[in-house]
């Protein structure tokens, strides 16, 4: 017998999201501290080609050097910055998905 006529619970609807967030959080907790402190590709090229001095500092940084200002423990700072980044990507993705579903409903007619 199918439960197709019964509405799904919160956990049934969002279980994949919850599992994904937990997996992403675990990846951040274990792998973010292992990130290289060497310059990224763009920084390295600017150093190698000697135009790094021409760069301007950004007007504002949300997570400078992937850390949280004011958090003294480097490991905790990097992990928190990673978790914030995952949260931002999650929120944007859910928002874009909701907008796409709403647009589809409007096109189909509800």
Image (spheres, rainbow, N blue to C red):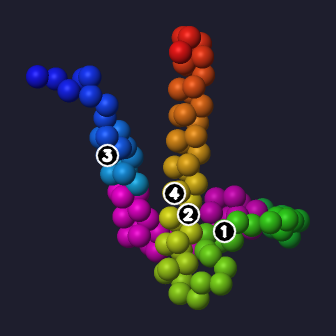
How many angstroms separate mark 3 from mark 4 (CA)?
21 Å
Q: Secondary structure at mark 4?
A: helix
Q: Tell which of 4 and 28 is nearer to you.
A: 4
Q: Identify the residue shown where x is 56% and y is 63%.
A: 84
> What number is the disc on residue 84?
2
Q: Identify the residue shown where x is 65% and y is 84%.
A: 70
Residue that badge 3 annotates:
11
Instruction: Provide the residue span drawn in magenta.
Output: 22-48
How many angstroms separate mark 1 from mark 4 (CA)?
13 Å
Q: Give the label, 2 or 3, closer to the camera.
A: 3
Q: Are marks 2 and 4 in contact (CB under 8 Å)?
A: yes
Label 2, residues with CA under 10 Å away: few <14, some 14-19, many ≥20: some
Whether 29 is among the magenta residues is yes
Q: Give the label, 2 or 1, closer to the camera.
A: 2
Q: Position of residue 42 (x, y in %)?
A: 69, 58
Q: Identify the residue shown where x is 36% and y is 51%.
A: 18
In the visual, does 10 lie left or right of 48?
A: left
Is tag 2's residue or tag 3's residue first in the polypeptide sequence? 3
Asked if 5 appears above or below 99 in the picture, the reply is: above
> What number is the disc on residue 86?
4
Q: Secondary structure at mark 2?
A: helix
Q: Position of residue 38 (x, y in %)?
A: 59, 72
Asked if 3 appears above or below 43 in the picture, the reply is: above
For the question of whether residue 36 can be seen, the reply is: no
The part of the image, by quadrant, that contains residue 12 is top left
Is tag 3's residue or tag 4's residue first in the polypeptide sequence? 3
Whether 36 is among the magenta residues is yes
Asked if 10 appears above or below 73 in the picture, the reply is: above
């Amino acid at each position: 017998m199918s439960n197709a006529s019964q509405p799904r619970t919160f956990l049934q609807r969002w279980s994949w999201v919850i599992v994904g967030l937990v997996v992403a959080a675990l990846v951040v907790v274990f792998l973010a501290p292992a990130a290289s402190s060497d310059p990224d590709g763009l920084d390295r090229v600017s150093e190698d080609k000697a135009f790094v001095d021409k760069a301007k500092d950004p007007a504002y940084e949300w997570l400078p050097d992937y850390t949280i200002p004011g958090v003294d423990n480097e490991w905790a700072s990097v992990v928190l910055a990673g978790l914030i980044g995952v949260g931002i990507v999650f929120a944007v993705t859910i928002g874009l998905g909701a907008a796409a579903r709403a647009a589809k409903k409007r096109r189909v007619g509800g």
